[in-house]
Amino acid sequence: MEVLVNKIRIKRLSPTAHLPEKATAYSAGYDLYSDETILLPAKGYIAVSTGISMEMPCNMEAQIRPRSGLAIKHGITILNAPGTIDADYRGEIKVLLVNFSDKDFLIEKETRIAQMVFSTISSTVIEEADILNETQRGNGGFGSTGNEKL
């Protein structure tokens, strides 16, 4: 069985930038590292520099997702989770971290701050319609697929 391998090109914008890497062979995400030491204030948010930019195939996107360890131990997560990086973006990858705790959090240089997961996307055409096909669910909203009530 042939495995399709996508090539992602990473450019260091800083000589000290840490390239993304997987923690294990079967990890879905690549760890992203801080390229600066910066204070994340209690109940605050900041954009943290990774010191890298990248190039990926035009049929791909990268999603920036939280690290569970930062969330459970320190109340730190990603403000716009998941953040999306489009294939045509060439700027620096920054991670928008938010601190939900009551304590300031010092992010040291080379701290693993997020994970990046790559996904293939399909071409999609949006077509306006006056009528849509009926389904059993219909226009049922949040919680309409079970007994949940909001």
Image: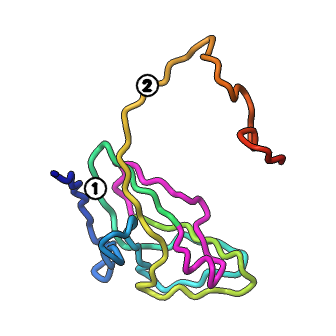
User: Which amino acid, by three-letter code, is at mark 1?
Assistant: Glu
Identify the residue position indicated by label 2 in the image. Answer: 125
Name the residue type under label 2: Val
In this picture, residue 112 sits left or right of residue 73: left
List the residue tagged with mark 1: 55
Q: In this rendered view, identify the residue nearer to me: 79 or 94.
A: 79
**Left or right of 82 on screen, residue 49:** left
Q: Residue at x 73, y 27 (%)?
A: 139
Where does the image place residue 33, in percent across and percent down from the top left? 41, 77
Q: Residue at x 41, y 80 (%)?
A: 35
Q: Is residue 130 above or below residue 4?
A: above
Q: Is residue 137 magenta?
A: no
In the drawing, does residue 140 fall left or right of residue 108? right
- Which span of residues is magenta-colored? 66-92
Q: Residue at x 74, y 43 (%)?
A: 146
For marks 2 and 1, the one nearer the N-term is 1
Residue 112 vertical placement versus 10 (above, below): below
Q: Height in image: 100 above or below 60?
A: below
Return the residue found at the far right. 149
Colouring chosen for the image of the structure? rainbow
**Distance in Å between CA atoms under marks 2 and 1:** 24 Å
Which of the 4 quarters of the picture holds residue 31?
bottom left
State the residue at coordinates (62%, 11%).
130
Q: Nearer the viewer, mark 2 or mark 1?
A: 2
Q: Is residue 87 magenta?
A: yes
Q: Residues within 10 Å of mark 2 (few under 14, many from 20)?
A: few
